[in-house]
Each structure stands twice: as C-alpha cells, then as structure tokens.
Image: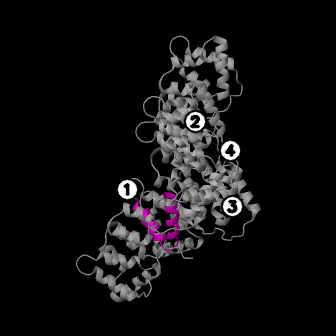
Amino acid sequence: VYRGSVKDFPGFDASQDAEALYNAMKGFGSDKEAILDLITSRSNKQRVEICQAYKSLYGKDLIADLKYELTGKFERLIVSLMRPPAYSDAKEIKDAIAGIGTDEKCLIEILASRTNQEIHDLVAAYKDAYERDLEADITGDTSGHFKKMLVVLLQGTREEDDVVSEDLVEQDAKDLLEAGELKWGTDEAQFIYILGRRSKQHLRLVFDEYLKISGKPIERSIRGELSGDFEKLMLAVVKCIRSTAEYFAERLHKAMKGLGTRDNTLIRIMVSRSEIDMLDIREVFRTKYEKSLYNMIKEDTSGEYKKALLKLCGGDDDAAGEFFPEAAQVAYRMWELSAVAKVELRGTVRPAGSFNDDGDAQVLRKAMKGLGTDEGAIIEVVTQRSNAQRQQILKAYKAHYGRDLMADLKSELSGSLAKLILGLMLTPAQYDAKQLRKAVEGAGTDESALIEIMATRNNQEIKAINEAYQEAYHKRLEDDLSSDTSGHFKRILVSLALGNRDEGPENLTQAHEDAKKLADVSSNDSSDSLETRFLSILCTRSYPHLRRVFQEFIKMTNHDVEHAIRKRMSGDVRDAFMAIVRSVKNKPAFFADKLYKSMKGAGTDERTLTRIMISRSEIDLFNIRGEFIDLFDKSLHHMIEKDTSGDYRKALLALCGGED
C-alpha cells in the first residue's frame, strides 16, 4: 500500500509543465504561487522529466533558473523537490560535511533511516554528482565509534529476511546485555555489529527480549553506556528499527517546538518522506502529540514556504473524519511490552548493613549537643538508613537519653533541611497523613498535593494513612477531605480514601464495557454524568484492568483517554483523573514529570520536591531516575544539583543516589 502524500499527477505532460514554469518566471518578478502549485502536485519522477523537457525547449537548466528566481527557505524547499531522492540525500550529506564543523544530526538522520537500496543509490549519486567517494569523505570528517557505525551503515548490508530464529534473538539480546550493562566498560563493537547488521524484524524481537531479561528498554542502556554522537546515532538506529515513522514524527516535532524552527530538518524530512511514509508519520504525530502535523506546520511557518509544506503534508488529521485506526496500534505496542517486562521497582535508600541503633543515636546526639549543629553528620545517618531503621533510632535515642529525637531535630535544624529530615523520620503513613493535613488545614487547599498522594497510593498505603491520620489528628481523613473540597472533586477523593480498589487481573469483557462507558459522550442519560462514569471506573478498577480499558478506549475512539479528559473536563477534577491515568500507565514517569516541573523555570517548588523525594525514596526512586533521563534528557541528580543549595541539596542528592 502506498503511504506517501504526493502522487503522480494524472494526465501529466512534461512539455506543458515546462512551459508553464517558464512563463511563471518570465519578465519582472515571478509567479511563486503557480510554481508552488505545479511542483508540489507532481511526483518526483515527473519533476525530473519536467527538468529534461525544460532543457530541450529552452536550452536552460530549470534548477538554476529556480534558484535565481526564488529566495530563502522557499527556494531551498522547491529546489530540493526537483532532485531525485538519492541526489537530494547526497547534497544534504555534502553540505553536512563541507566547510568547518560537521552537521552530525543530518548524517545520523539520513544514514540511520534509509533502506539498503536507498543507501546504495545515495553512494552512487554522490559519486556521480561530486566525483568523490562518500565513505572516504565521511571517514575523513568523523572519528571513533561514531565513524565505525556510519561506515557499517554505509555498506547497506542490513539483513532483509523476515525469517527469524528464536535462538539467535535470545543470543543477541544476551550479547547486548553482556556488552553493556553487565560489563565493566562497554564493548561497543557488539552494539555496532548487532544493531548495524540484523534485520528490522529480528531486532524488534531482540529489543523485546532485552526488555524482558534486563527490565529496561535498550534505549535506556544505550543512554547509560554510550555517549556523544555515537550514542545519538545508536538511539536513532533503534528508533528507526522500532518505527521509522515514529522517528520522523519526533524529529519533525523537535524541529518546530520551542523557539525558532529548524528549517533544514523540516525541509529535508518533508521532501524525503513525501513519497514514502508521510501518512504514517502524520498518524504517529497525531497520536503522540495530540495535534496534527498539518496544524503544527501551519502555526510555525508562513508565506509560500508554508503553503508548499502543507501541500507536501497532505490532509489535516485534526479535521473531522480524517483519522486513522492504525494510530492505536503504534501507541499500544509499547504498552503491551511494558506489561510483559517485569520492571522491578527499586528505591534508592536501602537498609544499612551493619546497623546499630544505639550507635546512631549517639552520633545524632553528639551532632546536636553544645554550640552549633553538625548537619553533615545528621544527613549522613538519616539518609543512609531505611525507614524501619530510623524508627528504631527514635526508640534508642529515647532509651539512651530520655529525650525526644524529633523535638531535638526540630530545634536544631531549620528551613528546607528541617522539613526533609523530619519528614524522613516519620513512617511513610505518618508522613503522608501530615502532608494531607497540611494540604487541607488553614485558608486555601493545596489540591495538587491531595491529588498526588491520593491518586498514587495503593490500598495498603491508603489504609495505613487513614490510621495514622486518625491517630495524629483525632479526625477521620474522609471527613477532613469532605469538608475542604466540593463537587465531583470531593467525590473522587472520598472514593480513593476508602482504599478499596479491586486488586484482581484484567477482565476483557468488562474492560470493553468500561471503555464504552468512558467513550460514550453522547449518552443522553443525564442522570449519570460524565464525571460520575469516569469516577466509578477510574477509582475502583485494578491497575492491570485499567490498562486494558485504556487500550480498548483508544481502539474505539482513536484518542488516548488523557485526550478525552483534557478536552471534556477542567480544574481539579481533570487533574485528579489525569493523575490516576498517568499513575496507571507508568507511575515512575508520573513522578518524574512532577519532579521536573517542580524545578524547571524560575524558582523551585520545594514542597513538591521534598515530598516526592521522601515518599518515593524506598519505593521506586531508582525507576523515577530512569524515566527522568528518558523524558528530559538530563539526570535528576544534575537537576537537583543545579536547582538547590547547601545542606538541603546535600541531603536530596544523598536520597537521589547515583549520577545516571
């Protein structure tokens, strides 16, 4: 099935088109609109024929004339469309390595994404156009493992058979694991050989197997094991193997998001994919970014340049009826996988090996006695013990000195550090209860803290929080939540506070029914509002079951359930449902996102930062770190280091653990 957006023009006549272009450029100024319309509605093969007809009719070079008549980005785009694909690639690479400095991103994009045949055509076109050897030029301009991998890709010898041997899949996955994660140092040659030679079909299974045996996606290992351009190239190769369309959708999104537009990238991709897989790219783009490629180009570019790009894009996937059922498939392959992978949740704080509660109590007393306080010693003890051990230290301190350790810490420490250390000394349930209490007491309510805690804790944790709350404040948590919130938001919190979520596996028939209930916007039965339907499912079903519901939802509506929540709800209700959905999909990623938001931009939201670092330190902070780097391309450690200071920073980094 042809998945490009540009097709052969029916009733094509090369001479007639050549004449039309000649007239559009004749005289003073040129008719850009006519040039644009004609060129974007012909296929590449037809454009090449127009060039030949133009030369025979006028004895002139069409490309040279277009260059002379047009300017800027629009000119680059139109001229790029006139060249055969292999010559276009050759020109891009020539420009990437000419002059001072190399455009590695361009080399990576082209060599990681092209098929064997496209690579062979490129090498031949390069020789024909520049009378030079492409491999020699690239090796002259690059170095190290990056260079080696580029050379492997330049051979265009990736296996192409779809027959896959299970044994080889397991062997390759094991070899990659042993070459990276399990080795002191990294055996790059293994990565180069396996990722550079094996067929796409085979490698997809290798990646699945790798996730199973290592508990992490291959991308995360590559980020941890490799560096620089070599790392970027290998990540691009992995992305293209998983889905070339997704790789290009991401590149396009990056080229346009934020300030400024990377026009070279935008032009290169729109031109090179217009007759290959533009429809697939559009589809992935729409699913991934909840916005059509068409709309993003429209907002981000202008003038004739914009018009030409939109013609290459084809339709607008936000328009009614312009939607692809395949979109669901892409989004869900990753989910299916994450369900299989036994991702072990790991905290960063573990019980200390040779633990002596009385010894620790003495160290703490010494740190606080006399003039001044030894914060370093306090941080050292408190962050390097498990919560259960900290509870023993509290008892030992009282037994040894007849004093209350909490009261002593409170009087010796202050500010953010005090909140962090005192928080670590409470049991997890006491700490959550205290945070909830803070969120509801006094004027104003901290809804985001209520949501973060209530939406992510499991039944056992919620029950323990209820008991701790009752004990500390002599009130029922449910009553305090009720009197401080209202409407659907209150009902969501009350339901979650029961700690009564199902714990069973998924039930397919039920999941289908549930998804239908969530998807059924138009239901006239007004007695059951949309929020009530969402509440009765999102607050009561088990996590594995909800994952299946979300999948069914996408199949039915072609939208992620998050999209529906965002579109149809607002305020705290929206935020609470979003938190539940994200927590079900990937809880560590939910917390990684909250941590990032607490530190990015001006000022730091220390309450959130402290709360998450304390409450996740023994549950899944290690996984949160992994997601953090995947999502934001920087380590949590690095961000805390940059964003906080003094002893507070020291204590947070101790909780965070490694550098990643």
- The amino acid pointed to by label 1 is Gly
CB contact under 8 Å: marks 2 and 1: no
Image quadrant in which you'd find residue 53: bottom left
Instruction: Say which residue label 2 marks.
Output: 656
Please, what secondary structure does the residue beneath circle 4 have?
Answer: loop
Magenta span: predominant SS is helix
Q: Is residue 252 magenta?
A: no
Q: At numbered mark 1, what does the secondary structure look like: helix, strand or loop?
A: loop
What range is drawn magenta here?
262-289
Residue 551 figure quarter? bottom right
Q: Secondary structure at mark 3?
A: helix
**Badge 4 vs badge 2, beta-carbon distance below 8 Å:** no
Between disc 4 and disc 3, whose residue precedes?
Answer: 3
* Residue, far left: 28
First-in-chain label (1 vs 4)? 1
Give the labeled residue for mark 1.
260
| 3D distance between C-alphas at marks 1 and 3 | 38 Å
Judged left or right of residue 271, residue 243 is right
Q: Tell me where residue 74 sits by quadrant.
A: bottom left
- On the question of residue 186 being in view, the answer is no
Q: Is residue 35 visible?
A: yes
Q: Nearer the viewer, residue 152 or 9?
A: 9
* Residue at 29% from the left image edge and 83% from the top image edge: 23
